[in-house]
Amino acid sequence: MHSSSACPFAAALLLAKPLYAVPTPQGSSQALANPDFGPIVSESPYYSDYNGTTPPFPGNYTQPVFPTAKGPPGPDDLLFQNLAGAEWAIYNFYQFGVDTFNESAFVEAGYPNTTYQRIIEIRDNEAGHARLFEESISNTSTKPAQCKYKFGITTPVAFLAAHTIVEISSMAFLTGLILQAKLDSSKAALVAVAETESRHEAWGLIDIWQQSPFGGPVDTAFPYANEILDTTKVFIIPGSCPAGNPTYPVPSQTLPSLSYAQNSTTLLPGSPITFAFSNPANQPKFEDGKTYYAVYFHGLLNITEPFDTKTYASKVPPEFEAKGLFLAVIADAPGAPTIDSVVAGPLVIVEQPVEINSGIL
Ligand SMILES: *[C@@H]1O[C@H](CO)[C@@H](O)[C@H](O)[C@H]1NC(C)=O
Ligand SMILES: *[C@@H]1O[C@H](CO)[C@@H](O)[C@H](O)[C@H]1NC(C)=O
Ligand SMILES: *[C@@H]1O[C@H](CO)[C@@H](O)[C@H](O)[C@H]1NC(C)=O
Ligand SMILES: *[C@@H]1O[C@H](CO)[C@@H](O)[C@H](O)[C@H]1NC(C)=O
Ligand SMILES: *[C@@H]1O[C@H](CO)[C@@H](O)[C@H](O)[C@H]1NC(C)=O
Ligand SMILES: *[C@@H]1O[C@H](CO)[C@@H](O)[C@H](O)[C@H]1NC(C)=O
Ligand SMILES: *[C@@H]1O[C@H](CO)[C@@H](O)[C@H](O)[C@H]1NC(C)=O
């Protein structure tokens, strides 16, 4: 992937075409620069009602939208470019579900006969988010296109478990991104989208997992949102992002990814846990004689537990309620007070239903 400023094609487009009369060849992604092109979010019912199995707008476009105006980027362009990058992965996850399964696949696996239709509706909502985030990026910056993704999922239950993880983690990074937003209108947009993800999550808890839809009084706010975005890069097929796409995400710490030995823990509060670092090419380096900590986030709290740098052993905080989402990071200071204090992670731990983490996937 290249940064937008390094893309010669964008500059050529600007030079070759008068500013507000950019021709839009049929099928060109550049047509998306016009906010009136395609169904309008919150006017058209399309982003809930499109029942096709082929990709909905704007998922039927594959190239980035290059700037149509010169000037400095908008105050929240980088935030929305990062968010669009994440959204393309999420939208494609649901489109993958629509492509891979059908109504009978979910019914045969024991789920309600409305499941496939709900997946279609969520897919449509996510397409609407992609359009909303494109439009939130000003005309002086590139609007990223989707890449190609692999999810490694073959069964309906694995897909639905991943759905629950995707929705609750996106609620956490949307809240975290509010800390980066410059404009109050961007903050409101992030909350409004997180609310929609929360409805998706509640549907899964009721209809799929037959649990209470509620996750305690407050969901998890994680301040280092880009660290969650970074974890979604495992779904991108290497080299599949179109030329001219902005780098995703920016900034990126490319921290070692954090997982855990499945036979070591129930993941419930108070349970022991043995962490693991699943990417052999990106292992943490623990300095001799230095103390490292496992810091767990839930709701608006974080709790620090010991972390053994030799055995990778720690403990899920007994103080937390068994609700919603925990996020765990390895840090070189209690409470992971700065982004640079985080040395690995985050790990997403879903507590509702907690079995989602332990072997279904
Ligand atoms: C994408 O879908 C929209 C909405 O149906 C349609 O207007 C547009 O022509 C489609 N574009 C392509 C390239 O398929
Ligand atoms: C952005 O560019 C598009 C395409 O040229 C144009 O339709 C739209 O009005 C522009 N938006 C703003 C805010 O200038
Ligand atoms: C899509 O299907 C749902 C459920 O069957 C239905 O309510 C809705 O009207 C359909 N939308 C369109 C555009 O046909
Ligand atoms: C669902 O897919 C299966 C396997 O491809 C197929 O046999 C079945 O007819 C499909 N059912 C529907 C309702 O399309
Ligand atoms: C779907 O399931 C409900 C009950 O779970 C049943 O009443 C309804 O007839 C079913 N619909 C179809 C189309 O099978
Ligand atoms: C748990 O699994 C790991 C490998 O993933 C293995 O090394 C370890 O011995 C297992 N522990 C127990 C208690 O079975
Ligand atoms: C974790 O909690 C401590 C104590 O309340 C706080 O000082 C610290 O900033 C928190 N860490 C983060 C990343 O918010």
Image: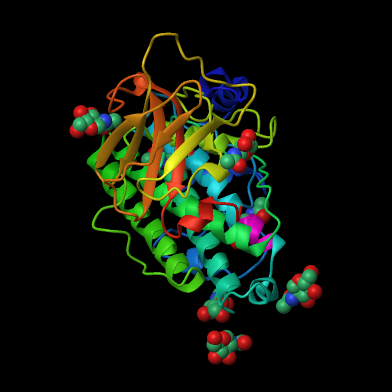
Q: Is residue 128 visible?
A: no
- Reply above or below: 146 against 219: above
Q: Establish if 95 lies above or below 145.
A: below
The one nearer the camera, 10 or 245, is 245
Q: How many marks?
A: 0
Magenta-drawn segment:
95-99
Residue 50: % across, % down: 56, 68
Visible residue check, residue 260: yes
Q: Image quadrant of ligand 6?
A: top right
Q: Residue at x 52, y 51 (%)?
A: 357
Q: Is residue 157 left or right of residue 330?
A: right
Give the x, y percent position of residue 49.
52, 71
Seen at 29% across and 53% down, the residue is 321
Asked whether, in this view, residue 67 is left or right of residue 63, the answer is left
Viewer-closest of 349 and 93: 349
Answer whether residue 201 is magenta in the image.
Answer: no
Most common SS among magenta residues: helix
Q: Any magenta on residue 98?
A: yes
Q: Nearer the viewer, residue 104 or 276?
A: 276
Q: Nearer the viewer, residue 358 or 204?
A: 358
Quadrant in the picture for residue 56: bottom right
Residue for point 43% across, 41% down: 272
User: x%, y% of residue 32?
Assistant: 54, 46
* Location of residue 144 by image quarter: top right
Q: Is residue 169 left or right of residue 183?
A: right
| Quarter of the image that includes the N terminus | top right
Question: With respect to residue 313, does 11 lie above or below?
Answer: above
Position of residue 297 in the picture relative to residue 47 (left or right): left
